[in-house]
Amino acid sequence: NVTLTIDGQKVTVPENYTVLEAARSAGINIPTLCYLKEINEVGACRVCVVEVEGARTLQASCVLQVQDGMVVKTNTKKVREARKAVVELMLSNHKGDCTTCERNNKCELQSVANDLGVKEVAFEGEMTETYEDTSSPSVVRDPGKCILCGRCVSVCSKVQNVGVLGFTNRGFETIVTTAFNKDMRDVPCINCGQCIAACPVGALKEKEEIDYVWDAIEDPNKHVVVQTAPAVRAALGEEFGLPMGTRVTGKMAAALRRLGFDKVFDTDFAADLTIMEEGHELLDRLENGGKLPMITSCSPGWIKFCEHYYPEFLDNLSTCKSPHQMLGAVVKSYYAEKNGIDPKDIYVVSIMPCTAKKFESQREELQSTGYADVDSVLTTRELAKMIKQAGIDFVELPDEDFDEVLGESTGAAVIFGATGGVMEAALRTVAEVVTGKELEKIEFEQVRGVEGIKEATINLGDKEVKVAVAHSTGAASKLLDQVKSGEKEYHFIEVMGCSGGCVTGGGQPHVTMKDRMTKDIRKERAKALYEEDEAKTIRKSHENPMIKKIYDEYFGKPNGHKSHELLHTHYVK
Ligand code: HC0
Ligand code: SF4
């Protein structure tokens, strides 16, 4: 440990701490903009400067290692003026349309400027060109709002191992963009939206689809069905001031009904359906010499990553569609037939924590009934906007249930939203199908948690099955490289495109810098899902009575003819 003095306070911290972290641990908030813990620690914006005794110039605290006996001042006139000057300079070249900006009230630049008491900004001379690149189905980019912090660049290259964003030009001309300034649509972006989650301002945002959904709701000829992903219920409350990790499943169902949707279904039902299909697909591959390891296929950012960067693994992907696409196909077939509705009059909306789902829903191969399985995808943030637009007092809503039949789900389904959840849900079912016996313990702790790559060996009767779980496409790359080189061998792999799984998807509520410093968002939100799992009476997908019903009435058996027509897909090399 190391002891230093910050603003007259003696502070003892581990020696690998930065001055920024040491100050936060002592309750002193140093403002930051370019800093993103462990991902972008570059000291570029200089908003976090401090005075250090003996140093001639101000130091960026986010990259300054603590030292024994160091004396630091974070709140002197010199420091305050330097910080203010930095922010004023940024604002003087910033498209200042705050009130209509996506990030109004959730903008880190705005809040730092406020905190520092910036009152006037001189707009002189040229400004960076502002325009919106709306070519991507998922991510919209406006360089006129970019503050060149580099957070998106680092996330895209270091965490996701994609690297389609970078700095170009020099000096005042510098912008963050794609190679040769191409449209987002024309670069191998995987649509994960992690750059949006990293952006402190409104330079990156999702492609909004709210108006299409309002139009559908308004249209008397449309039967509008909505479904919600597992991870949305773990984060939506944050948009309404509830603490991170608050479960809002019941309020969310109530809000959707009040917005005017005709049916409120749950993607969790389809997660159970996925386990039936994917579990039996795995057993078939194990028994009949199919391609192994089998890799999960529910995360569309991961699928795009695999198609672009690891096409040699495409035959390893499960052929299962992702759950929300399955549910869309079921709504436009089984549900439409049962209720005598023409599928052309049905409009399916998915509420997802994910921006890549927008891209996925537009894929041509995901139109099994002749119509798109899913018509619109809204992020958790977009749903919150709709609720606010409708004037619904979310926090005061009663808890309501999803609608029957496609709203019934198990604990296995809800944990899909956290890394390791799909694997655990699959193991709960596969183990019981193989052994014919009830599991004594249904929790598979080995695949839980936020470690980048997790491994386990599971005994299934007389078989040993080796499994691995990776989250973030960067971690997936590492794992696949090991599989490719023969260093590692597995039967079954779960990959989720985002670090932490869907709970930290690119469409989830933005998180303040303070919360980022003090909490592991991935764990807080995952906790809500594991709690919901524990609270359910039925916790295994194959025991969902509505899943049994739909196989009896419609699909016959998992991986049967009808399943293949509606619930499975193929990939693009
Ligand atoms: Fe997920 Fe899903 S678990 S990808 O993370 O499998 O987005 O939450 O909806 O479809 O169910 C996201 C979350 C889903 C799907 C499910 C899967
Ligand atoms: Fe990179 Fe993902 Fe953003 Fe695309 S969406 S630019 S892959 S971080």
Image (cartoon, rainbow, N blue to C red):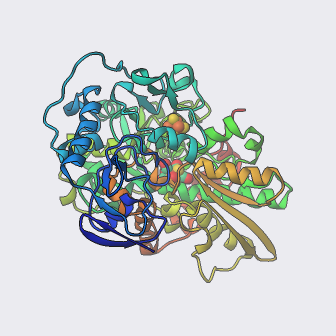
Residue nearest the observer in this picture, 9 or 136:
9
Q: Percent position (x, y) of residue 371? A: 52, 31
Task: Locate residue 308: give its quadrant.
Answer: top right
Quadrant where the C terminus lies? top right
Residue nearest the observer in this picture, 383 or 397:
383
Q: Percent position (x, y) of residue 218? A: 27, 32
Q: Percent position (x, y) of residue 275? A: 61, 59
Against 555, residue 401 (above or below) is below
Quadrant where the N terminus lies? bottom left
Against 189, residue 472 (above or below) is below
Q: Percent position (x, y) of residue 16? A: 49, 65
Against 122, residue 359 (above or below) is below
Judge from the rendering whether residue 117 lies leftward or rightward of residue 201; answer left or right. left
Against 549, residue 354 (above or below) is above
Judge from the rendering whether residue 201 lies leftward or rightward of residue 390; answer left or right. right
Residue 245 in sight from this viewpoint: no
Task: Locate residue 89: give its quadrant.
Answer: top left
Q: Which residue occupies 42% across, 60% down? A: 18
Q: Which residue occupies 52% across, 71% down? A: 539
Q: Which residue occupies 41% across, 29% down? A: 140
Residue nearest the observer in this picture, 346 or 314:
314
The furthest residue to the bottom? 440
The furthest residue to the top? 125
Q: Which residue occupies 25% across, 42% down? A: 82
Residue 359 in sight from this viewpoint: yes
Judge from the rendering whether residue 218 lies leftward or rightward of residue 268; answer left or right. left
